[in-house]
Amino acid sequence: MFKQLIRSGVRTPAAAPRLARFISFDAAKQPRIRLGSEAPNFDVDTTEGKINFHNWIGDKWAILFSHPADFTPVCTTELGAFSKLKPEFDKRGVKLIGLSTEGVPSHKEWIKDIEEVVTNGAKFEFPIIADEKLEVSYLYDMLTEADFQQIAKKPVFTVRSVFVIDPAKKVRLIMTYPASTGRNTAEVLRVVDALQKADAKSIATPVNWTEGEDVIIPPTVSDEAAKEKFGDFNKVKPYLRFTKA
């Protein structure tokens, strides 16, 4: 409906406030989602029913990732890959939720394709948000620069963003991919491991770190405190110390 109103120029009294938000666009009021921001809350329809996003997250971690439309080739492979990897996210207390700018009926038809060509018949295992009015897309600033510049003039679509959100509803990681490049599900899982390890042990993780490898002691921790907390550690430089975690 929103797209049709934009195209036709029709403004009904009920639609006018929402249309004005985009037609009289003010860049200064564009949502800012930064690391450490509270993940914006919303109520929305999904393939598994209506949800309130914060209530749906509950006391878990969550990964919200977006798609510009249903039945798109790269996104089909991604949703299937995340579904296949869901048991690993479950082990880490992480909930998955996708988003696309079509409605629930379209999503459910798309899921049939995903189950056929990616999951080899296995059931698709998490909800997809129906963001037909682009409300969540704008709320989370899921726009390309070109669309951002045209936001007051035409309908726009989402980019392919990933948000990792912790149980306190804080945004902990943001990744955005161009349409041509598929996401790396193993990397999303890896960064969840790194974030959870950092929270649990008050450490940092080095490049390409995976579970079981040495971690970094933050420079704010003295050698004496590091010895007491971590035991043995390898001091490569005064600012670079590795230990087990």
Image (cartoon, grey):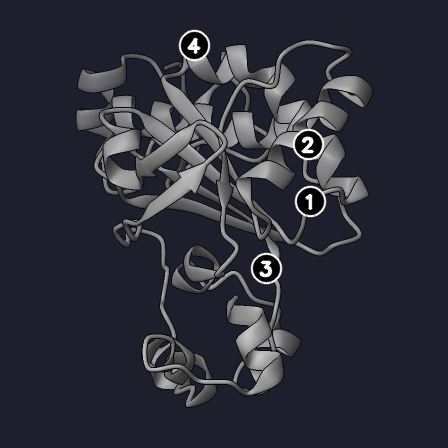
- Distance, label 3 to label 4, CA atoms, is 30 Å
For mark 4, give the secondary structure. Answer: helix
Badge 2 amino acid:
Glu
- Where residue 163 sits: x, y (%)? 45, 44
User: Which circle marks residue 158 in the picture?
Assistant: 3
- Would you place residue 6 above or below residue 2 in this image? below
User: Which circle marks residue 109 in the picture?
Assistant: 2
The one of 68 and 235 positioned closer to us in this rendering: 68
Instruction: Tell me which label, 1 or 4, sits earlier in the chain.
Output: 1
**Residue positioned 20% across, 18% down in the render:** 229
- Front of the two marks 2 and 4: 2
- Front of the two marks 2 and 3: 2
User: Tags 2 and 4 in contact by the CB under 8 Å rule?
Assistant: no
User: Tags 1 and 2 in contact by the CB under 8 Å rule?
Assistant: yes
Q: Is residue 93 visible to the viewer in this orientation of the structure?
A: yes
User: Tags 3 and 1 in contact by the CB under 8 Å rule?
Assistant: no
- Distance, label 2 to label 3, CA atoms, is 20 Å
Badge 4 amino acid:
Lys
For mark 1, give the secondary structure. Answer: loop
The residue labelled by disc 1 is 70
162 vs 93, left or right, is: right
**Residue positioned 73% across, 35% down in the render:** 76
User: Which circle marks residue 91 in the picture?
Assistant: 4
- Distance, label 1 to label 4, CA atoms, is 29 Å
- Would you place residue 35 above or below residue 88 in this image? below
Instruction: Tell me which label, 3 or 4, sits earlier in the chain.
Output: 4
- Front of the two marks 1 and 2: 2
Instruction: Tell me which label, 2 or 4, sits earlier in the chain.
Output: 4
